[in-house]
């Protein structure tokens, strides 16, 4: 055998048999049964001069050219051949590429490229995320606290000391007052809420809340506004006259004098604020024990459990309809409603939802007026106490007396003293007092 590429031509084959591996492909003779009419190819371009066709190298083969279509057949636009065969379709041939490349127009999507498994975050990353969330919540809470604290309107001098004032008693005592102030209500709102156009300042409801130092439940006591009491320096009159005569300061002094309980905080809310708070929490559910139809209070309710909006709630706590003792029933509705409002406002569905908690905070700070020493933390403790299902009762009373030019509610002195003594000493109210009411 001779080595390939030595330059010597291969011997010609006349038998038409297969050529050796080194023979040029363009010199292959026609085989029987093949198209003999096809002219043989000439020597390739660039062949050495004088070299025979047998001596041509295979690397000098002519470039492959696409055969012309049969005459009379115009090539279809976009048509071509793939691997020597005419292909269907008009879109251009897309070169092989990455599988995740988007397909061209008119091309079917190729199989998706396998993705590497997603890495799970490490424990350190999770701790960093949790720490960041806690930090944001902490900053937001602190900011909200100072924002609420700055919005609280304080009344100077409400709890100032005076000669003979009751000494501080255990626990924390709040005097909660609902005034019939029309401040902030337009003429249309006054007509809608049926509040009338009364001038001056009066109290519509008064309650004393005692929060014990221990684990006992708080106690909420209604003080009927028509109670006959002795107002310091003003003589015998109805309790709400103290507010009308001397405002919150004289009212606090009167309550401390007749009960012997030291008042630590004062909070007042008017009609407009009452409606705003109820609407901010989306209404409150109340079990109406008897149907109410009171045009003077702008109220018409069916019996049974139902959600009241702000205007309905205001009418519900103001109406004097129903019961043998209208004032007594009124105080019961006020306690019932106040507990329901605070319990819903302190629930996670309101506090953890910024779309309800922020409007509630704005409505509450706009609605309430407190003593100058009461801050946001004190308001928080009040809300927690009211959400703790406090024991509710009313000052025991028995009969009437004339005071302030009209009929007033006379307290049962013995049982009233037992009630207030329990609060002064931070003790639970005796059960017989609760049963009597």
Image (cartoon, helix red, strand yellow):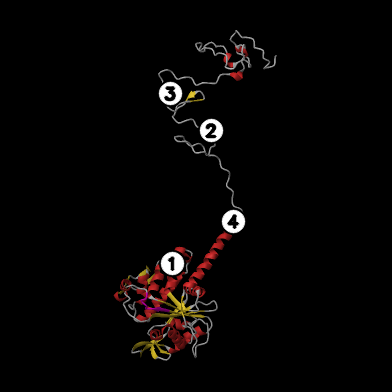
Q: Label 1 belongs to which residue?
A: 359
Judging depth in this view, the residue of 67 and 112 nearest the camera is 67
**Quarter of the image where the N terminus is located:** top right
- The span picked out in magenta is 177-183
Element marked by disc 3:
loop
Q: Earlier in the sequence, mark 1 or mark 4?
A: 4
Q: Percent from the top left, x then y, of residue 428? A: 50, 81
Q: Earlier in the sequence, mark 2 or mark 3?
A: 3
Judging depth in this view, the residue of 327 and 122 nearest the camera is 122
Residue 387 in view, yes or no: no
Q: Nearer the viewer, mark 1 or mark 3?
A: 3
Q: Earlier in the sequence, mark 1 or mark 3?
A: 3
* CA separation in Å, label 1 and label 4: 33 Å
Give the answer, above or below, for where 223 lies relative to 74: below
**Mark 4 residue crowding within 10 angstroms, few (<14) / some (14–19) / many (20+):** few
Q: Earlier in the sequence, mark 4 or mark 2?
A: 2
Q: Label 3 belongs to which residue?
A: 75
**Mark 1 residue crowding within 10 angstroms, few (<14) / some (14–19) / many (20+):** some
Element marked by disc 4:
helix
Give the answer, above or below, for where 35 lies relative to 152: above
Task: Give the residue drawn at x 49%, y 21%.
Answer: 66
* CA separation in Å, label 4 and label 2: 42 Å
Task: Give the residue drawn at x 42%, y 27%.
Answer: 77
* CA separation in Å, label 1 and label 3: 75 Å
Element marked by disc 2:
loop
Q: Label 4 belongs to which residue?
A: 126
Q: Percent from the top left, x then y, of residue 279? A: 39, 68
Q: Percent from the top left, x then y, of residue 412? A: 42, 88
Give yes or no for residue 180 being in the magenta stretch: yes
Q: Quadrant of residue 267?
A: bottom left
Q: Are marks 1 and 4 in contact (CB under 8 Å)?
A: no
């Amino acid at each position: 055998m001779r080595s390939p590429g030595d330059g010597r031509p291969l011997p010609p084959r006349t038998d038409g048999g297969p050529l050796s591996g080194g023979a040029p492909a363009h010199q292959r003779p026609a085989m029987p049964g093949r198209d003999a009419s096809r002219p043989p190819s000439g020597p390739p371009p660039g062949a050495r001069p004088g070299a025979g066709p047998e001596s041509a190298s295979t690397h000098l083969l002519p470039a492959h050219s696409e055969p012309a279509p049969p005459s009379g057949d115009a090539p279809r636009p976009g048509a071509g051949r793939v691997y020597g065969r005419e292909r269907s379709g008009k879109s251009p041939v897309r070169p092989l590429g990455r599988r995740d490349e988007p397909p061209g127009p008119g091309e079917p999507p190729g199989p998706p490229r396998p993705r590497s498994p997603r890495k799970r975050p490490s424990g350190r990353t999770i701790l960093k995320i949790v720490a960041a969330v806690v930090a944001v919540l902490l900053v937001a809470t602190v900011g909200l606290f100072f924002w609420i604290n700055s919005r609280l309107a304080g009344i100077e001098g409400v709890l100032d000391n005076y000669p003979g004032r009751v000494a501080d008693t255990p626990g924390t005592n709040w005097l909660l007052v609902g005034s019939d102030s029309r401040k902030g209500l337009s003429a249309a709102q006054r007509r809608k809420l049926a509040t009338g156009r009364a001038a001056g300042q009066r109290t519509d409801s008064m309650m004393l809340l005692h929060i014990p130092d221990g684990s006992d439940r708080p106690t909420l006591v209604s003080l009927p506004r028509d109670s006959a009491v002795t107002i310091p320096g003003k003589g015998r009159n109805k309790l709400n006259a103290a507010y009308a005569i001397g405002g919150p300061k004289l009212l606090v002094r009167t309550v401390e004098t007749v009960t012997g309980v030291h008042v630590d905080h004062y909070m007042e809310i008017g009609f407009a604020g009452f409606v705003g708070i109820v609407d901010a929490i989306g209404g409150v559910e109340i079990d109406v024990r008897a149907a109410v139809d009171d045009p003077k209070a702008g109220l018409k309710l069916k019996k049974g459990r139902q959600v009241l909006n702000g205007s309905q709630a205001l009418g519900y706590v103001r109406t004097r309809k129903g019961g043998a003792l209208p004032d007594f029933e009124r105080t019961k509705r006020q306690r019932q409603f106040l507990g329901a409002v605070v319990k819903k406002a302190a629930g996670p569905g309101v506090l953890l939802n910024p779309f309800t908690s922020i409007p509630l905070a704005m409505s509450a700070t706009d609605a309430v007026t407190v003593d100058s020493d009461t801050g946001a933390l004190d308001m928080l403790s009040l809300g927690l106490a009211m959400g703790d299902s406090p024991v509710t009762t009313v000052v025991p009373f028995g009969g009437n007396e004339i005071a302030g030019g009209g009929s007033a509610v006379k307290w049962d002195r013995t049982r009233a003293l037992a009630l207030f003594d329990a609060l002064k000493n931070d003790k639970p109210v005796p059960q017989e007092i609760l049963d009597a009411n």
